[in-house]
């Protein structure tokens, strides 16, 4: 591929004229022939055995041209913008000026250069660092969660149901003597006192014995999500099949040895305290960075092209689709469930997309102002970190992350570090008493 001309146009657009050499183009045509020949029937030849020259004579010399060129376009485009030293946004407009087996291909890309916006005074920005000191009650709560995870279920044999029990019940609900949809189940597991069912339901199971059959009367809330049941009086026929309760382990040194690498409660409490402090410190720093990011975005000078927002929305929608797929869902069904159309779905990402694009452009402006440069050593080091983080070979990481993109990410990170170092950050300490008062 040869980049033969770079021509500036208006509104940040450039025209790139590119020549694809005949040999490279013909190699791509040959690859298309080999890939598709089994699908082509030619009289007098067994399927898949017709020579390329015969197929081209029968269907035309350009029969494989479109597919051959399409297979090359991505790499040709990337090489062209890289050689032109342009960072582009949006999709290019492509025009084929000539295409020939003997002379190769000449085409033009019309691309839009990524804008380089200005930035106001980004030094001395003010932010608050919201710190939440670790209280003894925080450590107690974490230990209780550890005890919960180490608990075991004990079957009740000699008493009636009480709050906290896990009850296995059969039930069927009736309104005006008629059973309603979704109001019946067998061996349903319900934690009494959890508030999982409508108000009064769980309370009226408390006090009943295992094996007992009984009725309870409850009223559905006025704002119940099924309109046909909202505000209605109902009767549920209940059979209490089984009761269990959680037995928590004793909080002693033996428990500590069983669930951790420590020998004493004191050591465990100190470790929990240190980890909570570290987690909260990271959260506080993230909060500072978020505040500085918003302030920085407000300092941008210039207009953000709409195509950048739309491209970011595309990325976010694609990521959301992948996450849905991991749960066995797809976007079409999601839109049905949420009663949305595709436009409303995209609009749901718009505000976040604007913020992300604004912040990135602001950080790029800071990087230019600070003359931040990234070395090959920096890039190699980052590839190694990513390899260790994702437990993948470096070459595999490089196959889907371009070094230029990684370089820009590193510049943005260094720019944010400069903004953070020059910011005026005031500690804002919150304790439990203040939180209770504010609530």
Image (cartoon, rainbow, N blue to C red):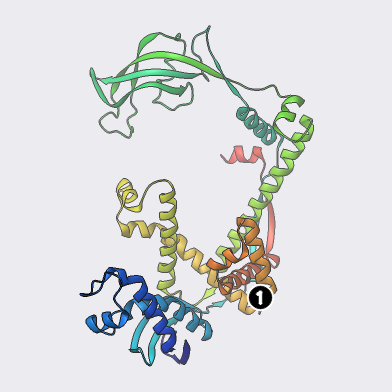
Q: Quadrant of residue 247?
A: top right
Locate the C terminus by quadrant.
top right
- Crowd band around label 1 with a 10 angstrom C-alpha radius: few (<14), some (14–19), many (20+): some
Q: Tell which residue pokes out farthest to the left in this image.
A: 43
User: From this viewpoint, is residue 299 visible?
Assistant: no
From this view, report whether residue 328 is shown above or below residue 210.
Answer: below
User: From this viewpoint, is residue 412 visible?
Assistant: yes
From this view, report whether residue 238 is shown above or below residue 142.
Answer: above
Would residue 129 appear left or right of 52 to someone viewing this image? right
From this view, report whether residue 147 is shown above or below residue 340.
Answer: above
From this view, report whether residue 67 is shown above or below residue 290.
Answer: below
Image position, residue 10 (x, y; %): 41, 88
Image position, residue 242 (x, y; %): 46, 14
Q: Which residue is depicted at the point 66% across and 22% down?
A: 249
Q: Nearer the viewer, residue 151 or 113?
A: 151
Q: Nearer the viewer, residue 353 or 186?
A: 186
Image position, residue 301 (x, y; %): 52, 77
The residue pinned by badge 1 equals: 374
Q: Which residue is depicted at the point 38% across and 93% down?
A: 103
Would residue 46 appear left or right of 330 to someone viewing this image? left
């Amino acid at each position: 591929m040869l980049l033969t001309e770079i021509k500036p146009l208006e509104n940040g657009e450039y025209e790139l004229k590119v020549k694809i050499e005949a040999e490279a183009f013909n190699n791509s045509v040959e690859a298309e022939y080999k890939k598709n020949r089994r699908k082509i029937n030619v009289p007098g030849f067994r399927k898949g055995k017709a020579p390329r020259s015969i197929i081209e004579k029968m269907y035309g010399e350009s029969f494989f041209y479109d597919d051959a060129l399409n297979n090359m376009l991505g790499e040709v485009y990337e090489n062209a913008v890289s050689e032109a030293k342009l960072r582009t946004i949006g999709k290019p407009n492509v025009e084929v000026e000539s295409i020939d087996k003997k002379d190769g291909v000449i085409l033009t890309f019309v691309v839009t250069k990524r804008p380089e916006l200005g930035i106001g005074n980004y030094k001395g920005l003010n932010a608050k660092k919201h710190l939440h000191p670790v209280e003894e009650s925080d450590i107690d709560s974490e230990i209780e969660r550890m005890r919960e995870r180490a608990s075991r279920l004990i079957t009740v044999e000699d008493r009636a149901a009480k709050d906290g029990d896990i009850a296995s019940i059969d039930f069927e609900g009736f309104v005006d003597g008629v059973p309603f949809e979704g109001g019946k189940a067998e061996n349903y597991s319900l934690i009494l006192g959890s508030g999982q069912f409508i108000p009064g339901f769980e309370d009226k199971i408390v006090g009943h014995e295992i094996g007992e059959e009984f009725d309870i009367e409850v009223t559905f809330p006025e704002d119940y999500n099924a309109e046909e049941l909202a505000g209605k009086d109902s009767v549920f026929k209940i059979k209490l099949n089984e009761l269990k309760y959680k037995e928590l382990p004793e909080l002693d040194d033996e428990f500590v040895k069983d669930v951790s690498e420590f020998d004493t409660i004191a050591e465990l409490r100190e470790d929990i305290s240190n980890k909570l402090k570290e987690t909260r410190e990271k959260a506080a720093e993230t909060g500072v960075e978020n505040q500085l990011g918003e302030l920085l975005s407000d300092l941008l000078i210039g207009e953000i092209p709409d195509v950048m927002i739309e491209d970011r929305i595309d990325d976010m929608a694609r990521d959301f689709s992948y996450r849905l797929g991991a749960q066995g869902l797809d976007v079409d069904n999601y839109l049905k469930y949420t009663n949305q159309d595709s436009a409303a779905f995209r609009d749901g990402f718009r505000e976040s997309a604007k913020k992300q694009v604004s912040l990135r452009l602001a950080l790029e402006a800071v990087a230019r102002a600070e003359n931040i440069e990234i070395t090959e050593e920096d890039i190699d080091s980052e590839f190694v970190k990513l390899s260790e983080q994702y437990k993948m070979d470096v070459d595999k990481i490089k196959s889907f992350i371009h070094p230029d993109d990684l370089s820009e990410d590193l510049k943005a990170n260094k720019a944010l570090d400069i903004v953070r170092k020059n910011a005026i950050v005031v500690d804002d300490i919150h304790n439990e008493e203040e939180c209770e008062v504010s609530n």
